[in-house]
Amino acid sequence: MRLNILWLFISVLVFTSCANEKKSPKTELRAANGLPIGNVEGFMAPEIQLNDINGNPISVSSLKGKYVLVDFWASWCGPCMQEVPELTNLYATYHGKGLEIYGVSLDNDKNRWQQATKNHQMNWIHVSDLKKWESQPLESYGVDAIPANFILDKEGKIIAKNLHGVQLEHFLKKLFN
């Protein structure tokens, strides 16, 4: 009996010491202003630079000085397409006041992507690498379902995320009025 207790004690000691082993801290990325970069409110937004429909590279950081709605969507996503009329209205209302929408498409068919933006009069910035769920910005922003969005302040800091419908409308109204 004592031998069993001794083995149990030794086993617990060995496993506990392994579990408490310190790991080297993960290096935290920081922006020039010292704020951490990440997908959390209060953090600086990760950079995205992808090509637009015409093949021109456009980065999120090039939009500093404006409030930016980074919108992850796809033409094949029913809920994404249901949001388009609301986004169109919000863009028409607030674009002149300093709002830009930076649409990141998860499409892998360029023609379908282009047709969706044209047919639904989505007249804001649209970018894609046509890699669907393998697109790097998804990992950087921690997106695992769409529609998903992030609102950035004029410096590129995340001030809200995943606001849809009335919540998004009220947030923008408060922000711009």
Image (tube, grey):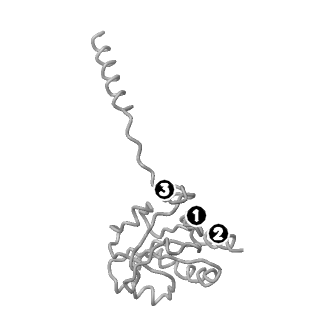
Q: Are marks 1 and 2 in contact (CB under 8 Å)?
A: yes
* Cα distance in 3D space between marks 3 and 1: 19 Å
- Count of labels in the image: 3
Figure quadrant of residue 58? bottom left
Q: Is residue 108 above or below residue 139?
A: below
Helix, strand, or loop for circle 2? helix
Q: Name the residue under label 3.
A: 30
* Sequence-first tag of 1 and 2: 1
Helix, strand, or loop for circle 3? loop
Q: In this view, does 29 lie above or below 9?
A: below
Q: Mark 2 points at which residue?
A: 171
Residue 160: which disc?
1
Q: Is residue 46 above or below residue 29?
A: below
Q: Classify residue 130 as left or right of residue 27.
A: left
Q: Position of residue 29 (x, y in %)?
A: 45, 55
Q: Do the residues labelled 3 and 1 touch (CB within 8 Å)?
A: no
Q: Position of residue 62 (x, y in %)?
A: 50, 75
